């Protein structure tokens, strides 16, 4: 089995447990991604296949990897990010993967759902392809608005009319340049153009689409892709070694613990971290801040006495002690929090994060602040509400119960084996060597 992932933590972490389960069953697993993830790949039991250097931005924030993206927000930032990070890298990814397949004739491919080089390689070779989501469900539906709008679902006649109108406007106006970019990209790799909607005309849907969440956290649809399965939370592998920071015992104190995290690739220092630290500076809470990447201390200013700042603390160890998470809407962090029953405060950032926030609000698991509502007072009120309003904690705990009822790695591996078996490649239940 060949795995291929975009070299960013959110695209890698969910597949780690699945790779380990596949390797445990005796399958030979190789994994194509960035060098920053080699240790994790090998810890999962897979053989690392390096991505060529010009494609490998692993270990960097988006601004570090693409300096010209700095300051971009909204639709413009979303489109340029998709274009540069996912579309324009796909042809070279495909070349890399076809070269790997020449010496490692895999029976099936497993990729994150925006590693389009893997999609192209599968389309050229006929190898069965499975996607594992790195975020929300990305295929269109008559029951939901297009991605990027952050709107709730609606299957009523009026709601479906709204959705259809937004799709039309998106295809013909807002995302027209992305449709053309996708068409050009497919032309470059010798594949026919697709007549599907913008953001879906880049690659054909896979045989299997695995969503790393629970059904109650995703919008209902009457027209889900037939290969779609909700497998539960895939939260990555715990680190082999964990050295708690010096303040760790404070987590066992009497103050509520508020985790503030901006994610690893898309950073929101000035829009999320700074105002949240100021908002909570005089509150009787312990504030743990994880930046995900190196942050210039001058941008944060003097840290309040109740703040503990770290670049990274494993969620496996930290979240059991957290009472509320404040986030910019990173999908993996949200799923990790809900799997522990932690209610949320969301200040949606760029990319698809408004759509993640819409699911938090729809599921009743937290407070969502709109872009215009982000100020110290609103942040302070939102955290207080999430801490004290039992509705949010109760709903988060209900979702946690649903997560606990899933064995996500096992379910995902079963489905991947079944996909390969349907092609006459691999028997279900693992292999004997």
Image: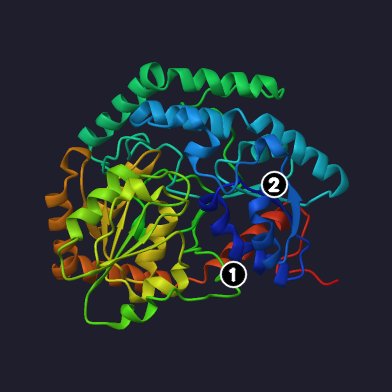
Q: Is residue 307 above or below residue 61?
A: below
Residue 325 percent coordinates (x, y) = 30, 62
Q: Nearer the viewer, residue 346 or 106?
A: 346
- Quadrant housing residue 205: top right
Q: Is residue 328 left or right of residue 382?
A: right
Q: Is residue 157 left or right of residue 316?
A: left
**Quick one: label 2 or label 1, which is nearer the N terminus?**
2
Point 54% across, 52% down: residue: 9
Residue under circle 2? 128
Q: Nearer the viewer, residue 359 or 285?
A: 285
Residue under circle 1? 410
Q: Is residue 214 visible?
A: no
**Label 2: element kind:** loop
Mark 2 crowd level (few <14, some 14–19, many ≥20, 10 Å Cα) = many
Point 16% across, 42% down: residue: 373
Q: Nearer the viewer, residue 328 or 69?
A: 69
Q: Is residue 382 left or right of residue 344?
A: left
């Amino acid at each position: 089995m060949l795995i291929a992932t975009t070299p960013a933590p959110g695209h890698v972490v969910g597949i780690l447990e699945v790779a380990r389960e596949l390797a445990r069953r005796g399958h030979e697993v190789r994994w194509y991604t960035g060098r920053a993830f080699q240790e994790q790949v090998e810890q999962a039991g897979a053989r690392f296949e390096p991505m060529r250097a010009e494609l490998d931005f692993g270990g960097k924030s988006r601004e570090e990897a693409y300096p010209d993206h700095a300051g971009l927000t909204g639709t413009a930032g979303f489109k340029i990010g998709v274009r540069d990070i996912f579309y324009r890298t796909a042809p070279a990814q495909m070349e890399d993967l076809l070269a790997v397949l020449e010496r490692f004739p895999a029976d099936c491919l497993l990729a994150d759902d925006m590693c389009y080089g893997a999609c192209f390689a599968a389309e050229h070779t006929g190898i069965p392809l499975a996607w594992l989501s790195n975020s929300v469900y990305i295929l269109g539906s008559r029951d939901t608005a297009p991605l990027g709008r952050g709107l709730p679902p609606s299957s009523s006649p009026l709601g479906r009319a709204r959705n259809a109108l937004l799709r039309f406007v998106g295809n013909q106006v807002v995302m027209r340049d992305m449709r053309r970019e996708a068409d050009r990209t497919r032309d470059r790799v010798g594949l026919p153009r697709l007549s599907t909607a913008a953001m879906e005309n880049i690659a054909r849907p896979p045989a299997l689409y695995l969503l790393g969440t629970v059904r109650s956290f995703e919008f209902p649809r009457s027209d889900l892709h037939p290969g779609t399965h909700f497998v539960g939370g895939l939260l990555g592998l715990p680190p082999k070694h964990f050295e708690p920071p010096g303040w760790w015992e404070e987590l066992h104190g009497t103050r509520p613990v508020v985790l503030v995290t901006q994610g690893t690739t898309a950073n929101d220092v000035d829009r999320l971290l700074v105002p949240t630290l100021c908002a909570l500076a005089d509150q009787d809470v312990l504030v743990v801040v994880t930046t995900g990447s190196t942050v210039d201390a001058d941008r944060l200013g003097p840290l309040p006495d109740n703040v503990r700042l770290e670049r990274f603390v494993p969620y496996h160890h930290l979240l059991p002690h957290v009472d509320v998470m404040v986030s910019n809407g990173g999908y993996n962090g949200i799923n990790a929090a809900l799997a522990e029953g932690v209610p949320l405060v969301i200040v949606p950032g760029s990319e698809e994060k408004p759509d993640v926030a819409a699911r938090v609000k729809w599921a009743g698991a937290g407070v969502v602040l709109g872009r215009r509502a982000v100020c110290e007072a609103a942040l302070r009120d939102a955290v207080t509400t999430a801490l004290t309003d039992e509705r949010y904690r109760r709903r988060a705990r209900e979702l946690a119960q649903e997560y606990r009822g899933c064995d996500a790695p096992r379910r995902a591996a079963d489905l991947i084996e079944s996909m390969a078996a349907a092609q006459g490649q691999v028997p279900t239940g693992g292999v004997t060597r």
